[in-house]
Image (cartoon, rainbow, N blue to C red):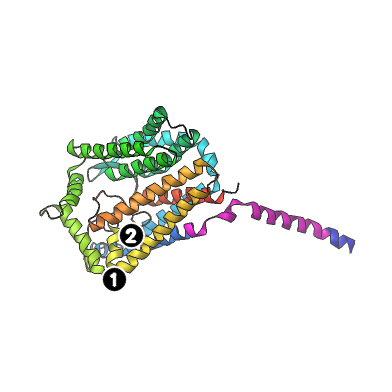
Amino acid sequence: MASIARSRRPSAVVLTERRARIQTSPFRHLDLLLVASTIAISMLGLLMIYSASRTRLETAGEDPFTFVKRQAIFLVMGLAAMAAVLAIDYRKLREWVLGGYVGIVVVLAAVLTPLGTNVKGSQARFQIGAFQLQPSELAKFFLILTLAAYCSMHRGDLGFRRVLVALTIAGLPLGLVMLQPDLGTALVLGAIALGILAAAGLSTRSIVALSAIGIVSALGAVQLGALEPYQVDRLTAFVDQSADGRESTYNLEQSKTAIANGGLTGKGLFEGTQTQGGFVPEQHTDFIFTVVGEELGFAGAATLLMMFAIVVWRTWRAALLSRDLYGTLVCIGVLAMLVIQIFENAGMTMGIMPITGLPLPLMSYGGSSVIVTFACIGLVANVHMRRFT
């Protein structure tokens, strides 16, 4: 009997050690609601992309699942990016962030050379086989990490010189993005910088001044011809939506018509007349929200916005629960990125915001945007699950 008892002890010890590892693992505190909401939005995005693109692809004699298959690959890559970010303690990322920031600035400069691909007047992508890499999306991720690291190092001491350094950190990628030109992404980078600086303790007066400088700079870019004609047309269509004979005004009218057609409960999946008729431009990318509005109606659009609200709420909660300022600022940066993109994209389809070409996070077709958004959600979940360590 004694020999049997002795033989059981190693197994009991192993079991106890395994249980202890599980109890101390940070993954025990993973925010499942945040992750589940993110995945649910991306699944709805797949369905909406299929609805928006299938008729046009079938008419052209192509596979109606072309964009869905590609987006599914992007989602898998996004989940892999999220898992990779979760596996590394976010505080250790500060040790590598400078190299990543310098690297992305170099890549943003390289995309402006003949190595980059010009699409509709914007030099913003690298063509890699059948896919395109948009480095300005990666700039969001590295700006969040770099600016959060710098501001957390100088907590409570953001004097003029240090604010100037912080603005330089944000200004380098922002300026290169404006040269592409991509006003929408520049707007997001500016919002990230402003959000992190505000959370780091920058005065309200300084925030107002920086916001005013940003608005004046954007208006100056329009007046000086820094934007392509079609981009200027998009912005002015928001101001004068009654103007005739402009493509952007026509596009906006089609977008608003599609959303209005949906009513309360929508016309039904794959039954939207504007969507299936191909009247709304870029509907599987910039105007994906119109598919939800027309085919799922107000109820479907409200449900989607509620799912986004859950993601925003959990991000804000992670910022509040973080054990250090760095984690808080990282979450605030991601929060600013998500809020500005959601509000701008949904608003432009309804005519209450200018058309800037920003994708709807996790919904719009596009690999770079999806992968980076998943990685940023991974940062938030990383901060949340390591709040006890």
Q: Does residue 289 appear to the left or right of 148 in the view shown?
A: left
Which residue was labeled with disc 1? 264
In the rendered image, residue 30 lying in the magenta stretch gets the answer yes
What residue do we see at 30% from left, 56% from top?
Answer: 346
Q: Name the amino acid type tagged 1.
A: Leu
Please report contact status of discs 1 and 2: CB closer than 8 Å, yes or no: no
Q: Is residue 198 visible?
A: yes
Question: In this orientation, which residue lies closer to the viewer: 260 or 313?
Answer: 313
Q: CA distance from mark 1 to mark 2?
A: 31 Å
Count of picture labels: 2
- Prevailing SS of the magenta stretch: helix
What residue sits 20% from the left and 56% below the top?
Answer: 252
Reply above or below: 188 against 206. below
Which of 290/346 is in front? Answer: 346
Q: What residue is disc 2 on?
A: 66
Please tell me whether mark 1 sits on a helix, a strand or a loop. loop
- Would you say residue 285 is visible in this rendering? no
Disc 2, SS = helix
Classed neighbour count for the residue bearing mark 1: other residues with Cα under 10 Å, few (<14), some (14–19), many (≥20)? some
* Boundaries of the magenta span: 7-35
Front position in the image: 270 or 190: 190
Q: Quadrant of the N terminus?
A: bottom right
Residue 162 falls in image quadrant: top left
Q: Where does residue 367 sit, x and y in percent of width and height?
A: 37, 51
